[in-house]
Image: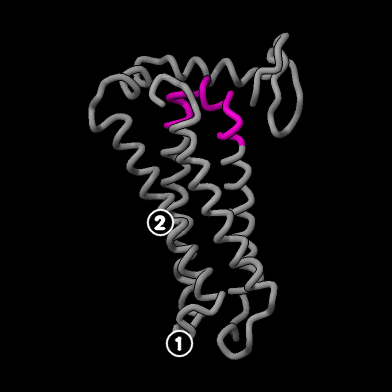
């Protein structure tokens, strides 16, 4: 979302007038609650650093496990059978839940800065694409019970390559947010 002047806001979804986004006021009020003020400003390891750690751990797990699956699909470690890798998808989704919850807390803590940042919206776009790609890998590649008995289709390798690129993009955009944004913490 980017302020365009005259109360007009651009988001990846639409161009709209600031007054037509009722949830924004709610999010801004949440940002300025006593709990969020403590979270941002206390300096306690149980505040911002702990949630940021959980966010990093979750995203690292999602990207790491996805990357391992992707590299196997691209031909790395061909002796490792593919079918057992299906078990990793549950761990990926659990790690994503940790990432999403911690990310929501981090967003609320700095809602005004994050929601006005193009890099935040770029990260969210890459994240949405990466999750769709992950779902396609699960349903189009790993749904085949005979995955290890025949050569992989080119679609599997394409999805694996795009998955690697998308998770690198999500991670890079997330790190750039710390350097390219100016907020109460960043």
Which residue does the numbered mark 2 point to in the structure image?
61
Image position of 13 with respect to 16: above or below: below
Q: Which image quarter holds the C terminus?
A: top left
Neighbourhood count class around disc 2 (C-alpha, 10 Å): few under 14, some 14–19, many 20 upward: many
Q: Identify the main secondary structure in magenta.
A: helix
**Which element is circle 2 on?**
helix
Report if residue 41 is visible in the image. Answer: yes
- Residue most toward the right? 15
Q: Quadrant of residue 13?
A: top right
- Residue most toward the bottom? 149
**Which element is circle 1 on?**
loop
Image position of 71 with respect to 122: above or below: below
Position in image of residue 58 (x %, y %): 40, 50
Which stretch appears magenta? 105-121
Q: Which residue does the image show at 41% across and 46% down from the upper left?
A: 98
Closer to the eye: label 2 or 1: 1
Position in image of residue 105 (x %, y %): 43, 32
Position in image of residue 145 (x %, y %): 59, 82
Q: Which residue does the image show at 63% across and 68% down from the upper left?
A: 139
First reached walking from the N terminus: tag 2 or tag 1: 2
Q: Is residue 111 magenta?
A: yes
Q: Which mark is residue 29?
A: none
44 sits left or right of 39 in the view: left
Q: Which residue does the image show at 49% across and 78% down from the upper left?
A: 76
Nearer to me, 53 or 175: 175
124 sits left or right of 10 in the view: left
- Residue most toward the front? 179
Q: CA distance from mark 2 to mark 1?
A: 23 Å
69 sits left or right of 4 in the view: left
Which residue does the numbered mark 1 point to in the structure image?
79
Q: Which residue does the image show at 58% across and 54% down from the upper left?
A: 166
Image position of 181 with respect to 149: above or below: above
């Amino acid at each position: 979302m980017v302020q365009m002047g005259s109360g007009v806001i651009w988001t990846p979804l639409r161009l709209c007038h600031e007054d037509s986004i009722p949830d924004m006021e709610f999010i801004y009020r949440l940002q300025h609650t006593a709990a969020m003020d403590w979270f941002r400003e206390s300096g306690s390891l149980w505040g911002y650093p702990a949630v940021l750690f959980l966010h990093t751990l979750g995203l690292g797990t999602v990207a790491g496990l996805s990357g391992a699956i992707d590299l196997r699909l691209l031909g790395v470690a061909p002796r490792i059978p593919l079918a057992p890798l299906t078990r990793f998808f549950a761990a990926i989704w659990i790690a994503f839940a940790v990432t999403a919850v911690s990310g929501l807390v981090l967003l609320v803590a700095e809602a005004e800065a994050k929601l006005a940042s193009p890099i935040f919206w770029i990260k969210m776009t890459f994240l949405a694409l990466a999750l769709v790609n992950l779902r396609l890998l699960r349903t189009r590649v790993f749904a085949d019970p005979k995955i290890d008995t025949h050569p992989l289709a080119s679609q599997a390798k394409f999805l694996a390559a795009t998955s690697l690129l998308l998770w690198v993009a999500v991670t890079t955009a997330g790190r750039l947010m710390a350097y390219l944004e100016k907020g109460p913490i960043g």
